[in-house]
Image: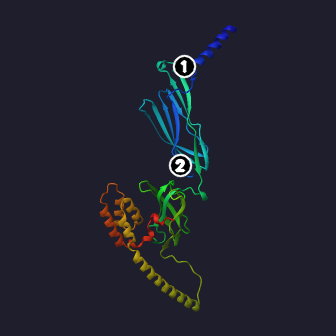
Amino acid sequence: MFYKISILFFLLVFSSYLNATQIINPPRGYSLEARLKETNILLGETTQLTLIYRYTDVEDYEIKEPQFSGIVIKELDSKDFKDKNGSFREEINYSLTPQREGNFTLNDLQVISQIIDTKYKNFNNRSKYTKEFSLKANTLTLEVIKLPNNITAIGEYQLKASVDKQYAKEAEVVTLTLSLYGDGNIQNLDALEPKIENATLNLLYTTRSKRMHLLTKVYEIVSEQTYTIPSFELFYFDKEDMLIKKSNSEFIEVTINGYRKTQENFMDNKDKYLYFLLGFTSILVLLSLYKLLTSKKEKKESTLVKRVKKSRTKSELYKNVVVFLGRDKELDNFIYQLEDETFLNFKAIKKELIKRLVKLGLNERDNLLFTAKNTL
């Protein structure tokens, strides 16, 4: 009886051994390599990790998904192809976005492969002849530097706010457009949330144009009282100049026609006389300032025209005139033509734009230009 049990036990152990996958050392021609696009980045930036698996002939393999504490990882793409030397290669790209500063060690990057000798590939019980091995990639180090004042925006930007009208009736809709032009790591304008007293805001839509490097956010505003749209500001780090800079928009006051604040103060005759003198003096001062400003404007009237004339490309010309969108249908038509990739008559459209800007008097409004010149 004992003899039979021993034989049965031996057969069970031996059969399980035959069916178990054999673990071996990695053969020649197989390797796993890790590469970082940048090894030093600023907090808020993203770098790219590439895993490259080279192999000759495999039954199956699995590349482990990278996992690093404090880093958000996202697979971007992958491709596999045959090298000129006859071996095969798979490349997988990941984006790495660190969530804190410091030095990160990127290790434990591994691939597990199974191979089988060609003479056993047609056998029924192939698992008996399968051999398995694992490969680890080289260890990488990523340095993440934190910017002062908790700034995470990196690049070069210009921020602007505009409305379709500054005078409206009670409960009439006013459209507010927030625009951010430039290149960097900002993906959206979620951080910019306008708060306006005595007004109701409704977000209509957001847009993004990679070709024009432009992010926009459009709101509807409704109010029965005069209100002020606050200035929006953005602090960012310019890597080219290695400086922290600021771009901000102007305050915008929207007047509601017919709205007057209730006043319960009653003035006697002396107060009325005093207010009359103050009002008269203020008018004289304003007239003097108006003449002074008008004389200065006349000297600057050609600033916009000169800038438009000096525009050498459609992109440069578009950047100088895009702030005037929505002011005139004919002007809008010229500006939209600049976005057309197939449009070739650049000189003609520039000439017509100058004529229209001068006719509308917009050449006198250089302070509204949305250019890098206005970025602090």
Residue receiving disc 1: 128
Asked where in the image residue 107 lies, by quadrant, the reply is: top right
Three-letter amino acid code at the position of disc 1: Lys
Q: Position of residue 368 (x, y in %)?
A: 44, 69
| Separation of marks 1 and 2 at Cα, in angstroms | 45 Å
State the residue at coordinates (57%, 81%): 263
Looking at the image, residue 195 sits to the left or right of residue 174; the answer is right
* Eye-nearest disc, 1 or 2: 2
How packed mark 1 is, by other alpha carbons closer than 10 Å (few <14, some 14-19, many 20 or more), is some
The number of discs equals 2
Q: Position of residue 220 (x, y in %)?
A: 48, 63
Q: Which mark is residue 89?
A: none
Relative height, residue 29 to residue 93 (above, below): above
State the residue at coordinates (59%, 37%): 108
How packed mark 2 is, by other alpha carbons closer than 10 Å (few <14, some 14-19, many 20 or more), is some
Q: Which mark is residue 46?
A: 2
- Closer to the chain start, of discs 1 and 2, is 2
Along the line of sight, the residue nearer the viewer: 281 or 351: 351
Note whether residue 263 is visible.
yes
State the residue at coordinates (53%, 89%): 277
- Name the element at disc 2: loop
